Amino acid sequence: MATPSLDAASIARLVDRFYDRVRADALLGAVFNPVVADWDEHKRLLTSFWCSVVLRASTYRGNPMARHQPHAIEAAHFERWLQLWGETVREVLDADAATVMIEYATRIGDGLRLGLGLPRARHGRGLGIPVVGS
């Protein structure tokens, strides 16, 4: 699923821009800002995560589910996260790379939702894509 335009540098730019937006977002910032002590380190960790997912870099060591479980995360947070992610990837990456990153984020988000016992979106997948039969 990887695309030639996706490399560690492009993923780092994406993560940096995206989490700057998360920090400033009224809904998401309220969840992330109180628990992230060092944003630069958090961005490095998330860059490692995304490089491991997309590039098979095997640099990430962690448990995203365990890290998210103690927080007051609701379905609306996932909706906003995916919306903001989609906007950011489309601005930072070319169309093919953006599609790849949105697909990964949607699957990862679905897995986290399931693990946290949250419902999937009723009106789409958070990116304005209708889900047939919903």
Image (tube, helix red, strand yellow):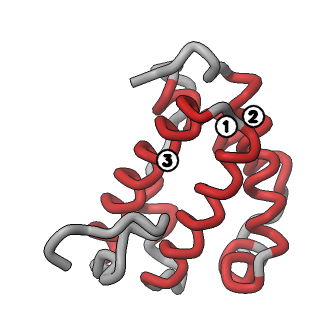
Amino acid type, label 3: Ile
Rate crowding at label 1 as few (under 14), some (14 to 19) or many (20 or more) other CA atoms within 10 Å: many
| Residue displayed at 38% across by 67% down | 125
What's the distance in space between the residues labelled 1 and 3, CA to CA?
A: 15 Å
Asked if residue 18 is positioned above or below residue 24 in the image, the reply reads above
Q: Tag 3, which secondary structure?
A: helix
What's the distance in space between the residues labelled 2 and 1, CA to CA?
A: 5 Å
Rate crowding at label 2 as few (under 14), some (14 to 19) or many (20 or more) other CA atoms within 10 Å: some
Asked if residue 11 is positioned above or below residue 62 in the image, the reply reads above
Which quarter of the figure is the C terminus placed in? bottom left
Tell me whether the residue at label 2 lies in contact with that at label 1, contact meaning CB atoms closer than 8 angstroms: yes
Q: Position of residue 17 (x, y in %)?
A: 81, 50
Depth order, front residue of 72/75: 75
Residue pointed to by mark 1: 47
| Residue displayed at 31% across by 58% down | 111
Q: Tag 1, which secondary structure?
A: helix
